[in-house]
Image (cartoon, grey):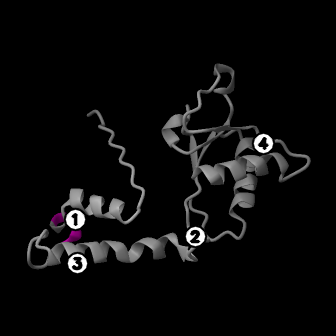
Amino acid sequence: MFHLNVPDRLGYACRLLRKAHSRGAKVVVSAPPATLVRLDKLLWTFEATDFVPHLHVAAAAAVAPHLKDTPIWLVEHVEKAPHHEALLNLVDYYDEATGFSAMERTTGWDAAITLAMAARGVTPRGAGGVESFVPATPFVAELRRLGFKISVDVQLLEE
């Protein structure tokens, strides 16, 4: 289920987590560190009479064994959580510094990079899909050069 364009994302997340907890769900919340800090504080204060048990786990932090049963985990990386019953992903939609949405920040970059690669002869001539014509390694290198933070997580699935 997707909840988009809610006016107060973190307030909405608090209410959603309260509801999930009241129904016995275990939830992992994934978000950038600054968002997790704000959500952690808000979960303690958004309602004077409600308690939403949660654990904010910093990227390099170890978790004490007695805290591992906490039903709501706030983590930057989902794999840090011991359960994955439900996931609330607080995706970055808006950059206050530039005024651009995530879509606006990224939409034109792939076309600009692909065009530059074609002009340099890195891609084959003619028409074709980006997936097959644009080599991934130089494309990702160019994104990094432009300041995009990219992480790669490869997991092999057993057959």
- 81 with respect to 13 (left or right): left
Give the amino acid type for the residue marked by disc 1 in the picture: Glu
N-term mark: 2 or 4 = 4
- Magenta residues, as a range? 128-132
| Quadrant of the drawing holding the N terminus | bottom right
Q: Nearer the viewer, mark 4 or mark 3?
A: 3
Q: Which element carries disc 2, helix, strand or loop?
A: strand
- C-alpha separation, residue under disc 2 versus residue under disc 1: 27 Å
Give the amino acid type for the residue marked by disc 4 in the picture: Val
Give the amino acid type for the residue marked by disc 2 in the picture: Tyr
Q: Are the residues at dot 4 and dot 1 in contact (C-beta closer than 8 Å)?
A: no
Q: Name the residue under label 3.
A: 115
Q: Mark 4 points at which residue?
A: 52
Q: Is residue 121 visible?
A: yes
Seen at 29% across and 59% down, the residue is: 140
Q: Name the residue under label 2.
A: 94
Q: How many labels does the image show?
A: 4
Q: Mark 1 points at which residue?
A: 131
Q: Which element carries disc 1, helix, strand or loop?
A: helix
Q: How crowded is mark 4: few (under 14 residues within 10 Å), some or many (20 or more)?
A: many
Q: Is residue 128 visible?
A: no
- C-alpha separation, residue under disc 1 versus residue under disc 3: 14 Å
Seen at 35% across and 73% down, the residue is: 109
